[in-house]
Image: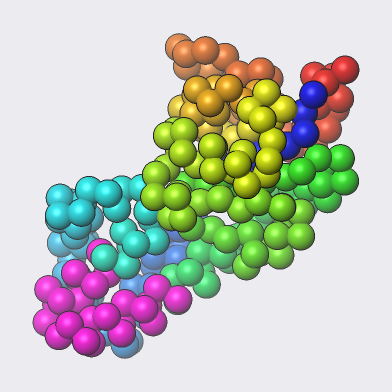
């Protein structure tokens, strides 16, 4: 019955928030050295205001985290007094620094072993709202389809990323299971498209008041046995 497994990435295969915070601190230290006016003239409140101003001018960037971050950085550099050419160059250089640090992460226990095992039995795909890239992490060998909101222009729970993955994989919704941590972005979004759903509930939270997923696990190592029972 199940031919395709689609995986969320952030907070499903690794913990995200500490990595992003550390990456942002790495970027600020880089700015201190290479674009000091950015940190000298923009305090924390001013940097937060950049997000609001960019979204007010370009609301579609809400779904494209890479373009959104680039726009924030470039606007901040311009406000700090760098001209357009300088701001653009520094933005590109700084983003590479951020992206390197963004991928300095640690997989959850059993993540790579799980993917290696499942990839011998199912077609695997990623569907992510973030800009972590499994190719930079050496996991692309397990995935035949890689889909991001950056690429599609819309983020989960919108149907578009799910439908894009299904089309590229050549698999029907009824033959697909989505695995993710977020009750709305992952579970509700996948349910709306007709996918089976597995909630990765690492923190053992209570399920919110909405239609329940097909199943729930708290450790990635539980997924093969759950799949065997579910598809029996």
Instruction: Give the quarter of the figure containing the C terminus.
Output: top right
Residue 223 in picture, x, y percent from top left: 78, 32
Residue 127 in picture, x, y percent from top left: 56, 45
Q: In this view, does 222 lie to the left or right of 138?
A: right
Q: Which colour scheme is used?
A: rainbow
Q: Is residue 122 left or right of residue 68?
A: right
Residue 226 visible at all: no
Q: Is residue 204 left or right of residue 228?
A: left
Look at the picture and state if 144 lies above or below 203: below
Residue 79 in picture, x, y percent from top left: 12, 73
Look at the picture and state if 185 lies above or below 210: below
Q: In which quarter of the image is residue 76?
A: bottom left
Picture residue at 45% right of the left edge, 76% below the top: 96
Picture residue at 42% right of the left edge, 42% below the top: 155
Look at the picture and state if 189 lies above or below 33: above
Q: Which of 28 and 210 is in front in this view?
A: 210
Span highlighted in magenta in the image = 72-96
Residue 77 visible at all: yes
Q: Which of 23 and 124 is in front in this view?
A: 124
Instruction: Give the quarter of the figure containing the N terminus.
Output: top right
Look at the picture and state if 52 lies above or below 39: above
Picture residue at 34% right of the left edge, 73% below the top: 28
Q: In this view, does 5 lie to the left or right of 88?
A: right
Residue 98 in picture, x, y percent from top left: 44, 70
Magenta-colored segment: predominant secondary structure: helix
Q: Is residue 50 magenta?
A: no
Q: Is residue 73 magenta?
A: yes
Picture residue at 31% right of the left edge, 85% below the top: 89
């Amino acid at each position: 019955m199940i031919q395709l497994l689609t995986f969320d990435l952030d907070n499903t295969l690794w913990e995200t928030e500490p990595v992003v915070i550390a990456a942002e601190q790495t970027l600020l230290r880089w700015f201190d050295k290479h674009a000091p006016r950015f940190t000298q003239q923009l305090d924390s409140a001013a940097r937060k205001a950049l997000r609001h101003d960019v979204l007010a001018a370009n609301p579609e960037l809400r779904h494209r985290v890479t373009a959104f971050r680039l726009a924030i950085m470039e606007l901040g550099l311009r406000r700090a007094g760098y001209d357009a050419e300088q701001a653009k160059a520094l933005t590109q250089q700084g983003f590479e620094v951020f992206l390197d640090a963004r991928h300095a992460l640690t997989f959850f226990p059993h993540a790579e072993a799980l993917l290696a095992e499942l990839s011998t039995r199912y077609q695997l795909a990623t569907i992510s709202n973030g800009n972590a890239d499994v190719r930079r992490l050496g996991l692309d060998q397990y995935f035949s389809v890689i889909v991001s909101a950056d690429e599609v222009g819309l983020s989960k729970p919108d149907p578009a990323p799910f439908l894009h993955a299904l089309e590229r994989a050549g698999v029907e919704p009824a033959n697909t299971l989505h695995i993710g941590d977020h009750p709305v972005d992952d579970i509700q979004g996948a349910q709306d498209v007709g996918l089976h759903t597995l909630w990765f509930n690492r923190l053992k939270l209570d399920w919110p008041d909405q239609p329940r997923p097909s199943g729930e696990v708290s450790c990635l190592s539980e997924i093969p046995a759950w799949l065997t029972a579910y598809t029996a």
